[in-house]
Image (cartoon, helix red, strand yellow):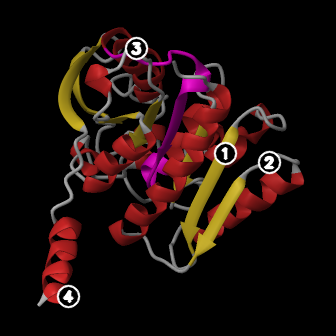
Amino acid sequence: MKRILLTLLFFSILFTTVWSANVDTVTVFSKTMQKQIKAIVITPESYSKSTSKFPVLYLLHGHGGDQTSWGNTSEVKEISDTHNMIVVTPDGHQSSWYFDSPVDSTFKYETYITEELIDWIDRNYKTISTREGRAITGLSMGGHGGLYLAFRNQDIFGACGSMSGGVDIRPFPNNWGLSERLGKQSEYPENWEKNTVINQLYLLTPNSLKIIIDCGTDDFFYKVNEKLHEELLYRNIPHDYISRPGVHNWDYWKNSIKYQALYFSEYFKSTNKQK
């Protein structure tokens, strides 16, 4: 009987674990795009009682998603509490690809995130407002965004990552609204060359950024991730690269983000001494 009660108690604790991270839905006005844009901000349980400043992980959604794609998952609350970090999940539009569109002036998502959103977060939350206190990653389209934004804005981000990222968009000229943001590849090839992650590597020097890349071996983006990994090796750019069985789905990403959160947490600990 005692063993049965202990077993029941164990499973009761296991299945009733509630992460105490606080979830805010905020609205930030973009002067660049002249519209209100939502984001979800997750703060750890310790946030309200602490006088310390906290590192921030910007977590980007994929094509077709919005701020709730990551923001409503239990994994993100767990990450915030476990690693004592703020997590921001912005709405990057269903198909922005997180760059400033050269053909549509109403899409300026690089400017929005790197200038407007980060400034608003730093003014309204207790953040470590330096590159040493910021990391960015995302899934699929957001994986492209995580690397693209960090490579191009190394004064803002100290660490970055990608999960199943579209790290080379050129092999996919007819997919995911890309031609609406860049123009048709056959007509505007220079736009595609300038805005694909793999062509941003010239901006990197060894150890200028902490980089982690993760992609499943059965993912349709696997080959372009392998190519990016090989090019980083060729250029002597240190990075972590994870390749394991998996496809382009949430089962993979909910596991992947746990590895990446630990990676970013170690980076924050190595660069910041929180009081």
Q: Which residues are magenta?
A: 125-143
Residue 16 placement (x, y as % from top left): 15, 62
- The amino acid beneath tag 4 is Arg
Disc ID at residue 138 = none
Measure the C-alpha gap from mark 2 to mark 3: 29 Å
Q: Determine whether 27 is above or below 99 in the image.
A: above
SS type, badge 2: loop
Give me the residue at 11% from left, 90% from top: 1
Disc ID at residue 211 = 1
Measure the C-alpha gap from mark 1 to mark 4: 48 Å
Residue 130 placement (x, y as % from top left): 57, 17
Measure the C-alpha gap from mark 2 to mark 1: 7 Å
Badge 1 crowding class, 10 Å Cα cut-off, few under 14, some 14 to 19, many 20 or more, is many
> Which comes sooner in the sequence, label 2 or label 1?
1
Residue 131 within the magenta-colored segment of the rendering: yes
Residue 146 placement (x, y as % from top left): 52, 41
Instruction: Judge whether residue 167 can be spotted in this image.
Output: yes
> Which comes sooner in the sequence, label 2 or label 3?
3
> Which comes sooner in the sequence, label 1 or label 4?
4
Disc ID at residue 3 = 4
Disc ID at residue 238 = 2
Q: Determine whether label 2 and label 1 are within 8 Å by CB.
A: yes
The mark closer to the camera, 2 or 4, is: 4
